[in-house]
Amino acid sequence: MRRPSLDAVRGFDRAVYIVAAGQLVNVFGAGLVYPFATVHFHLQIGIALSLVGFGLLVKNVATATATAIGGYLADRIGRKPVMVAAMAGNGVTLAGYAFVPAIAAAVPGLSLAGAFVIVSAFAGITNGLYTPASQAYIADLTRGKNRDRAYSLLKVFNNVGFGMGFVVGGLLYEWIEVAVFIADGATSLIVAGVLFSLVPRVHIPQRDVTLTDSVGDWGRAITRRRVLWLALLNVGFAVMYAQMQTTVPIVAKESLGLSASQLGTLFILNPLTLVLLQIPVVDAISRWRRSRGLVLSVVFWALAMTSIWLVYLFDLGPAAPNSHSMLTVGVGLVGLHLVLRTIGEILHSPVSTSLMSDLGTEDERGSQLSLLEVAKRTGFGIGSFAGGLFFDYGLAAWLWPTLIGVGGVIVVGVLLLERRLSPVENGIAVPE
């Protein structure tokens, strides 16, 4: 095996590093909130987990819709304006979560769950515009295997910020619970300023194309079988992704009794694994077929779901016999889940994005990447809502084998897609 080196993160345009650093700051804000959102609104505010999951479903549907629009706008008016506007909007909407009880109290007849859903919808709209524009911006500045490396670099920067956010968020949440939501919005405003000031425009806007033509571009993307196929597979992956935010924190907090600071510290295993393994793993599979990388990803996801299932099968909580040692085993299994699912994420995220980037022309790239993000957000929403239903109806132990079954369906789909990919598209030949 080749020894990984810093060469894997060198040689990019300066703008790539600026975008990566900006996302580090933004994802730091997301990390402040991520493990604590469902804990706060379900265990502290008292909203049923399925309704919290429904709110996240609404957020992700809104994000998916805005992502589609973001892809159009990125192609039509340029990547940079969309990125800046999206981050500025996030600064307002993400901070809105701190005021959910106040909104519910101020509007007659509006429940806490209803206020949560409304805030989630607006947060989803502003959040959805950013991702396809930023991915297309990076794709404009890279090609071939350098594009895989660039997306991996973004992932590393994202998760350095994520990890710092988990630790700081745990401390903030124990001090003033709503402070994590205010800080999340503030980081988005900082990133908007960084992008506006330091990032150049690299894409020539196609201003002569009408909105109808733009919708047609996206319409053509969803009618291409391989593009739609990959997007549907991404829905399945995202259903598994969603559990880290929705149900795993409840397992750690409610079943194992962890404090907020302990939960934040445990969750740092996710970004720590990403920082340590993202570049080496992507570098190690760089000569593989991209489809085989996705299959290996599912293997790690299935093992991750098995580790949480074992917590339920052996009742590894504070009330178990030999509770201290059994609790230690339970926390260890949750930690193992975070490491295994993160390796699955490493194998999935940059590979699927690069594969989608190579399934069309440069002019179609923004729309196709937006479709991939729509699929991801749809899966997040479905996974959050479904996970909440399993928990609310006393079927939490059955969620994890169900997700293992979802992984099996994804493997079959990936192998069928592989037969329809060219060597260049599947990453085993150099484009001319």
Image (spheres, rainbow, N blue to C red):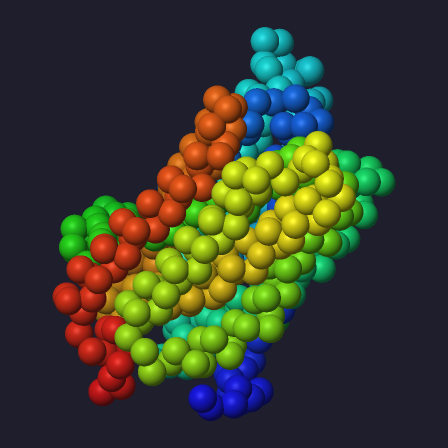
Q: Where 360 falls versus 257 (above or below)? A: below
**x 33%, y 83%: residue:** 287
- Residue 274 position in % (x across, y down): 57, 66
**x 49%, y 72%: residue:** 152
**Figure disc tally:** 0
Q: Where 201 falls versus 252 (above or below)? A: below
Residue 111 sits in which quadrant?
top right
Q: Nearer the viewer, residue 361 or 225?
A: 225
Q: Where 397 falls versus 184 (above or below)? A: above
- Residue 31 position in % (x across, y down): 65, 52
Q: Nearer the viewer, residue 392 or 95?
A: 392
- Residue 26 position in % (x across, y down): 63, 57
- Residue 172 position in % (x across, y down): 80, 45
Q: Where 84 falls versus 200 (above or below)? A: above
**x 71%, y 27%: residue:** 44
Residue 361 sits in which quadrant?
bottom left
Q: Nearer the viewer, residue 103 or 260?
A: 260
**x 55%, y 88%: residue:** 5
Q: Residue furthest front?
A: 321
